Image: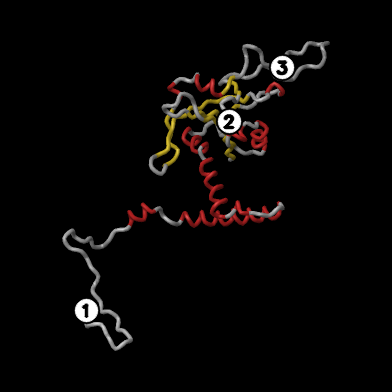
């Protein structure tokens, strides 16, 4: 599966190429992205009239039959269409927001095609307290995928960006100073291999809270008394002056 931010998600040719490779994608898009509302599609080509040139094969639009932006479609949704979904545990609190999803068709340059684009998911994030939605995704994930799973996959970009940051700052991916593709390829391969090893080693170390929860001292000292280690004699000095004797604890 491929996760794309809105900077590359606006490129319909890129999303189409990913689909042709047999890969699923979740691509962020801008609020101005044009789609066909659920149940709608562009008009079919004009019927052929014999004796008037070649038959037309391209899809059509008219003044009353046009696509809408994802923002306009989201604003028209009823409040019942939005659902609160939690996708992961944050540092201080669980991360959750309100989402809505529906099946749409992309309208990007479909007037140059003879068949409409296939249906795909439109995922909308509308946090509580915001006047309008904040994020949009177009996804080719299966039609029967669960709501929570879709949100979790759409939010994977945070993890990918974190991996990229650690690769550049901690492992040294951003320290390459060569000029050739061969050298950079070797440098990147070694950094990714090292990062993969460290991730596998990290999985074997339990979180700090879990480790502290598992640790239990065998004897708990009372409030009035404290457990002190036995007193031991000071080591003998090489000089004639020696430390006074002491009793073994």
Q: Nearer the viewer, mark 3 or mark 1?
A: 1
Task: In this rendered view, identify the residue nearer to me: 247 or 199.
Answer: 247
In the image, residue 169 lies at what x, y percent? 55, 52
Horizontal placement of 131 versus 241: left or right?
right
- Quadrant holding the C terminus: bottom left
Horizontal placement of 117 versus 214: left or right?
right
Q: Secondary structure at mark 3?
A: loop
CA distance for labels 3 and 1: 102 Å
Q: Which mark is residue 29?
A: 2
In the image, residue 116 lies at what x, y percent? 66, 23
Taking the spot 52% from the left edge, 25% from the top edge, the residue there is 102
Disc 1: CA contacts within 10 A as few (<14), some (14-19) or many (>=20): few
Q: Nearer the viewer, mark 2 or mark 3?
A: 2
Which comes before the other along the chain, label 3 or label 1? 3
Taking the spot 60% from the left edge, 51% from the top edge, the residue there is 174
In the image, residue 103 lies at what x, y percent? 55, 25
Which comes before the other along the chain, label 1 or label 2? 2
Image height check: is 2 above or below 136?
below
Quarter location, residue 59 = top right
Image height check: is 202 above or below 96?
below
Disc 3 designates what residue? 45
- Quadrant holding the N terminus: top right
Q: Which mark is residue 55?
A: none
Quarter location, residue 160 = top right
Taking the spot 40% from the left edge, 53% from the top edge, the residue there is 207
Which comes before the other along the chain, label 2 or label 3? 2
Q: Secondary structure at mark 2?
A: strand
Report if the CB atoms under discs 2 and 3 are less than 8 Å apart. Answer: no
Disc 1 designates what residue? 248
């Amino acid at each position: 599966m491929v996760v794309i931010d809105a900077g590359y998600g606006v490129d319909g040719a890129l999303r189409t190429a990913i689909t042709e490779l047999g890969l699923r994608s979740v691509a962020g898009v801008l609020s101005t992205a044009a789609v066909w509302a659920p149940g709608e599609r562009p008009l079919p080509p004009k019927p052929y009239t014999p004796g008037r040139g070649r038959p037309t094969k391209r899809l059509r639009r008219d003044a009353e039959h046009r696509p809408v932006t994802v923002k306009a479609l989201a604003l028209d949704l009823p409040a019942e269409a939005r659902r609160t979904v939690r996708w992961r545990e944050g540092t201080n609190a669980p991360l959750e927001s309100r989402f809505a999803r529906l099946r749409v068709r992309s309208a990007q340059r479909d007037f140059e095609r003879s068949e409409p684009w296939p249906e795909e998911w439109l995922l909308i994030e509308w946090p509580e307290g915001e006047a309008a939605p904040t994020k949009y995704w177009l996804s080719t994930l299966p039609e029967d995928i669960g709501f929570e799973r879709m949100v979790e996959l759409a939010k994977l970009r945070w993890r990918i960006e974190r991996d990229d940051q650690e690769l550049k700052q901690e492992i040294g991916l951003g320290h390459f100073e060569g000029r050739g593709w061969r050298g950079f390829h070797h440098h990147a391969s070694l950094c990714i291999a090292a990062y993969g090893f460290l991730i596998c080693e990290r999985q074997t170390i339990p979180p700090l809270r879990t480790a502290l929860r598992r640790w239990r001292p065998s004897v708990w000292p009372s409030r009035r008394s404290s457990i002190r280690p036995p007193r031991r004699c000071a080591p003998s000095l090489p000089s004639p002056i020696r430390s006074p004797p002491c009793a073994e604890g």
